[in-house]
Image: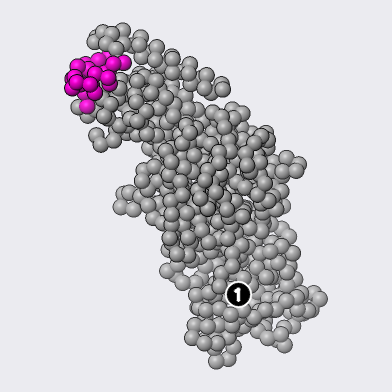
Amino acid sequence: MKFIQAVAVALVLGWLAGCSSTGDSKEGDVAVEDHSGTAGDDGAATASGVGAYGDLSVESLNDPNSPLAQRVIYFEFDSSDVAEQDRDIVAAHAAFLAANPEVKVNVEGHTDERGAREYNIGLGDQRAQSVRRMLEFQGVAPVQITTVSFGEEKPAVEGYDESAWSMNRRVELVYVGY
Amino acid sequence: MKILHSSLLIFFLCLPGWLQAALTIEITQGVDGAVPIAVVPFGTVAGSSAPAEDIAAIIASDLARSGRFAPLAERDMIARPVEVSQVRFQDWRTLGSENLVIGKIETVGANQYRIQFRLFDVFRGRQITGHSLPATADQLRYVAHRISDIIYEKLTGQPGAFATRIAYVISEVRNGKKAYMLQLADSDGYNPKTLLTSAQPLMSPSWSPDGRQLAYVSFEKRRAAVFVQDVFTGKRQELAAFAGINGAPSWSLDGRSMAVTLSRDGNPEIYSMRLSDKKLKRLTFGAAIDTEPVWSPDGKSIVFTSDRGGSPQLYRMPAQGGRAQRLTFEGNYNASADISPDGKSLALVHGEGGRYRIASLDLESSLLRILSDGQLDESPSFAPNGSMIIYATESGHRGVLAAVSSDGRFRQRFSLRKGNVREPVWSPFTKRK
């Protein structure tokens, strides 16, 4: 129960954080909610244009200056809470995915090498689920998201101290076919 | 008093080709009180050709690895009896050997041998047991392990577990790419055989109770799936490939059910799958991570890892699900349990102060005892006679296997020449022809 509450609070905070940063950005207060609807209906997909998170076209996935270029979210030890500073990253991907309902994303959860391997599969799964819930909360259709946990099996960095471990406790957003 | 034998390498003299892949075993912590025994090199019956294996050396190595025996070095033997009539007990009393093993090998056909051995009580001056076993050339090592089992049981009252195998996972870099292998080897690290090679992670091997099949997790499709593979034929089938986690397979001891962890309902939960029709029954509920199920030997309960209390700890619930009882309270991390064959204790990963070590938990007294001395030890697995626990550890930043006696007094390390080896699981007792 506590966990669910924590996730719910985190999601609301994350959403609010996303909104407040929207106000600061030069593009003004373009909302993200309706893009998926218009995109599918009458070929008006281009209407989404440049939103709160910049260019939301599929081409922006390959733009190194797009917020979508950031596809890794890091976690504290034995935690599956998305940190405050990373919520904008998730929100940018959520806006992109909501605007492009044909795009699919694989949410891959990872842990550091410490502890039991199958428990780490569980922990990586919960990290991936945290990100999935944030994406869905912000308008991404469930069919666009698959999750997989690799636990400690696929470290990003080979190493044996906190500097390596902190890079391995992560969720990677992998766009399928892009 | 513990003695460090860092230089005592158990002999691996045989076929050099095997050394490449075999696990070599080093005793890293010996014990006082190991019983002196002499295993005399086996003779060859007149007219027979000597086999490719040194049977006595295999037996002596087995007995030394158990931590219970201290075999006499061959160079210290003052006699080499082959027949009963050649045994002078006084020689062996002088050397302090409490027991003596002699034997001979006879060729009885093309690639067919008969191996006879006798075990003596040196101080009473009488034979304890004697057997004659047939073997083909490629069964010689196995038959030597069977002889070790007989000797061990006669002298300790507990069945030997030398004629068993271990399965484990290897990862190595090949041409700049990671490769993962599921292998099995004899309990002394010899005869390694690869069951599966994949470019994606393999994990969590689990033996069927008859030792004929292994369940494991493969990410070969970039997502987790549980497979079951016949060890002898190599034939395999996919057992679980739901959305999310398909992990932590564990066979019930009647062989009819498999406990698995799935997250298809949104959270890591333990399920029991009836193998006859793959029907699933969900056993755990809630927002916590519930995983790493293992069945008790009587099939009535399942021990598992859960972070429902805020940190990973071990719990026990009825095999059909229901109220779980917390078992571990010491330390902030207790996971990855294996249950001893007698059901009385657990081996587990115990984390405290940033160190992860193997510990045993007495289920009656709740006494926790730390058995290993690594930093990141994991994946404990009991030998089928409960005498040893094999586990994964690190040495020089490489994954190696180690084994520790259940009382923590005796340790040894299994090393590969290259690559990382991990997730060892000791087979049940098996019958091989």
Left or right: residue B397 versus residue B290 is: left
The image shows residue B278, relative to residue B10, as above or below, that is above
User: Looking at the image, what colour scheme do you see?
Assistant: one colour
At x 67%, y 54%, the residue is B341
Residue B253 appears in the figure: yes
Q: Quadrant of residue B411?
A: bottom right
The image shows residue B301, relative to residue A97, as above or below, that is below
The image shows residue B209, relative to residue B120, as above or below, that is above
Q: A134 or B137, which is in the foreground?
A: A134
* Kind of residue indicated by mark 1: Ala
At x 55%, y 78%, the residue is B135
Q: Position of residue A131 (x, y in %)?
A: 41, 26
According to the picture, the residue beneath numbered tag 1 turns out to be: B56
Q: Position of residue B187 (x, y in %)?
A: 56, 62
The extreme bottom residue here reads: B47
Q: Position of residue B396 (x, y in %)?
A: 48, 48
The extreme right residue here reads: B124
At x 65%, y 61%, the residue is B66
Magenta region, residue range:
A33-58
Q: B92 or A91, which is in the foreground?
A: A91
Residue A162 appears in the figure: no
Q: B403 or A60, which is in the foreground?
A: A60
Q: Position of residue A62 (x, y in %)?
A: 22, 29
Label 1 sits on a secondary structure element that is: helix
Q: Is residue A36 magenta?
A: yes
At x 55%, y 92%, the residue is B47
Q: Quadrant of residue B428?
A: bottom right
**Quadrant (top left, top right, bottom left, bottom right) of the C terminus of chain B:** bottom right
Q: Is residue B109 magenta?
A: no
The image shows residue B280, relative to residue B228, as above or below, that is above
